[in-house]
Amino acid sequence: MNLHLFVNEMRLQWYEMRQYWFETFSGLIFITCLFLGLFYGIKGFALEQGDGQSLDGLLFGFLLWTFASGAYGSVTKSVIEDTQKGYIEQLFLCPNGFISLMLSRSLSESFVGLVLLTAIAYVVMAITGNWLDINLAYFYGILLLSAPSLVGFGLMISGLALLFKRVETIGAFLTLGLMGLVALDGLPLNVFSFLPFVPGASLARDIVLEQSPLRLDHLMIVIANSFVYLVGGIFVFRAFEKQAKKRNLIGQY
């Protein structure tokens, strides 16, 4: 990945959002309404139980899930859509390599996603009156550190898409599975720490929601989790890519 690719991908993001402004606006409205439906559906039960923290946890968990879904889907969506449009082969001719292009695209979509996520968060908090004291510097930093684990996982599924072309069912299943991942506690080190994004979600919850002090050992677990899944995702994707080229499947759909 290099700066030139990242800048171009940021420009592409902006052009597509501006060109398809109705889709962009509709997507933001949909996510906002989806959360409001969940919030008010659970609010009565939480208040009856006298557990106000449940509402804070719900809001924060929804933010984590929205970011995780975007980071995971940034690569898989691109591979599937570019294959359907018929120019996936051209992307493989990128001088910096296809994986570098995908990593730049994922990083640019993560930045844009954080901006939109922040806007949605404050709109939702204003509507519901349930305000969270969010340290944006810690929140953004932890999410960006933990995002590579989801990108690596997305590369693994993208490799399957090169061979089998249609993997929407698996993608939908894993997107729903992310709801469970963001709810798990991966800190301190335990069996859940080896799942993608779980340590990052736990650290973000501890720092932002519980306002616990940042611990270096917890931060290192997040970094190690991201590194292992990203490297593993690249390795698996290249293995599937090699098979797809051997069978002449890259340009077929």
Image: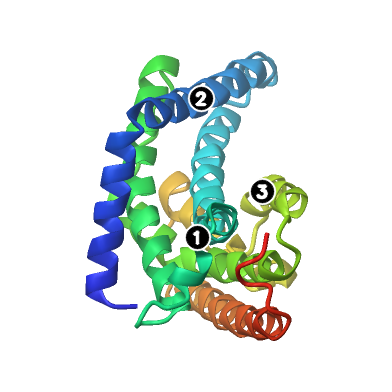
Q: Position of residue 36 (x, y in %)?
A: 53, 20
How crowded pointer 3 is (Cα within 10 Å; few <14, some 14-19, many 20+) is rated as some
Specify the label residue 186 is tagged with: none
Give the CA separation, mark 2 to mark 1.
28 Å
> Which numbered marker is on residue 175?
3
Could you tell which of marks 2 and 3 lies nearer the N-terminus?
Answer: 2
Q: Determine which of the numbered discs, if any, sits on residue 203 in the image.
A: 1
Q: Is residue 213 visible?
A: no
Please name the amino acid that badge 3 sits on.
Thr
Q: Is residue 176 above or below residue 107?
A: above
Q: Earlier in the sequence, mark 1 or mark 3?
A: 3
**Which label sits on residue 30?**
2
Query: For the point 66% across and 72% down, which residue is it?
Result: 159
Out of 49 and 42, give the one closest to the viewer.
Answer: 42
User: Secondary structure under badge 1?
Assistant: helix
Q: Marks 2/3: CA distance?
A: 17 Å
Residue 102 drawn at (x, y percent): 45, 68
Depth check: give the residue in front, 226 or 234: 234
Q: CA distance from mark 1 to mark 3?
A: 21 Å
x, y percent for residue 140? 35, 55
Q: Are marks 2 and 1 in contact (CB under 8 Å)?
A: no
User: Image point 73% across, 81% down: which residue?
Assistant: 247
**Residue 81 higher or lower than 100, as above or below:** above
* Nearer the camera: disc 1 or disc 3: 3
User: Amino acid type of disc 2?
Assistant: Phe
- The image quadrant where one finds the N terminus is bottom left
Q: Earlier in the sequence, mark 2 or mark 1?
A: 2
Going 66% across and 48% down the picture, which residue do you hit? 175
